[in-house]
Image (cartoon, helix red, strand yellow):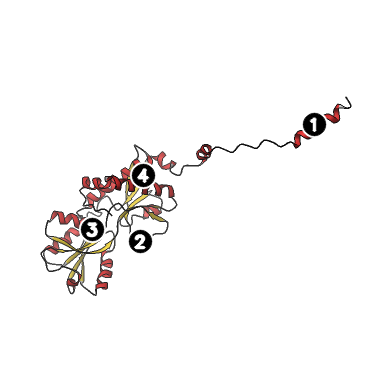
Amino acid sequence: MGKRGPLLALLVLLSACAPQPAASAPSPSAARTATPDPLASLRARGTLVVSVRMEGPGGGRTPGDPAHTRKRALEAAIGEALAARILGAGAKAELRGAGRDRLAPLVSRQADVALTLRTFATEGIVYSTPYAAGGLVLVAAAAGPVRDLSALAAKTVAVTPGEVEGDAALQALLRAQGVSPQLRAFDGLTQAVDALEAGEVAAVVGDRVASALLGEQRPGRLRVIADVVKQPYTVATRADARDLAAKVDEAIKAMLASGEIGEMAKRAGVPWEAP
């Protein structure tokens, strides 16, 4: 018994010093499972909140944009398509009217995305591939004497409230041409074009899409003489929602390539131009 004690002690010591088997690394599939999905909460909610300009004109005002209802219909269709593509079948889009500043609900995290004109770089905001041409154009009477910007000297030009400040953009364009017309404000584009056809103003600056629709409604009577500013329609997301932004851009590119957005615009009655 006396000889076994030292022998057992030696065996225990050797066992403790022996190299232990390394712990197996987690499999790639297990690692992926452990990573949280940043879109999971949106998919669980089943609704994509989409900021748009407004559902309808406020304050009982008669709408001056003849394309207003049609543009909202197109935005609703695009929102529903994005919800289905990004969150899955059965997901819905909730439109949230934001007034002129469509980005405000996005910045305050009251909306997930915003359908908006790409006006300028905004801190904390990223924009998708454009899905339609947009901006402001200058329109004159087709049978009138105004053929270009130089003909506006000492004339009156109508400006209207729009997605951007039309009067400021127009004045910048005219200054570059050395022309200084008088500007007259109207509540809406329809009223301004009525004044144009009545000879009260020489030209009208207005939304590109709405101007195209008025041209369709008054065939052969209106002519675009200049682009005031080009601002395509895009989908904005917050810069910290990188995965959502990537999915949005992927969806817009796919819908453009398939012609789906053009078909949506046709069903909504919107004069659509590829960006």
The residue beneath circle 2 is 120
The amino acid beneath tag 3 is Arg
State the image coordinates of residue 224 (x, y, percent, origin top left): 18, 62
Residue under pointer 3: 208
Dot 1 corresponds to which residue? 11
Judge depth for marks 4 and 3 and give the one in front.
3
Question: Disc 1 versus disc 2: distance between alpha carbons?
Answer: 76 Å
Residue type, mark 1 in image: Leu
Quadrant of the rendering where the C terminus is positioned? bottom left
**x and y percent of residue 40 in the render?**
44, 41
Label drawn at residue 48: 4
Q: Nearer the observer, disc 1 or disc 2?
A: 1
Report the side of 240 relative to 101 (left or right). Answer: right
Residue reaching furthest top?
1
Give the mark toward the camera: 4 or 1: 1
Q: CA distance from mark 4 to mark 1?
A: 67 Å
Q: Marks 4/2: CA distance?
A: 24 Å
Residue 213's image quarter?
bottom left
Q: Earlier in the sequence, mark 1 or mark 3?
A: 1
Asked if residue 221 can be seen in this view, the reply is: yes
* Distance from the alpha carbon under mark 3 to that under mark 2: 18 Å
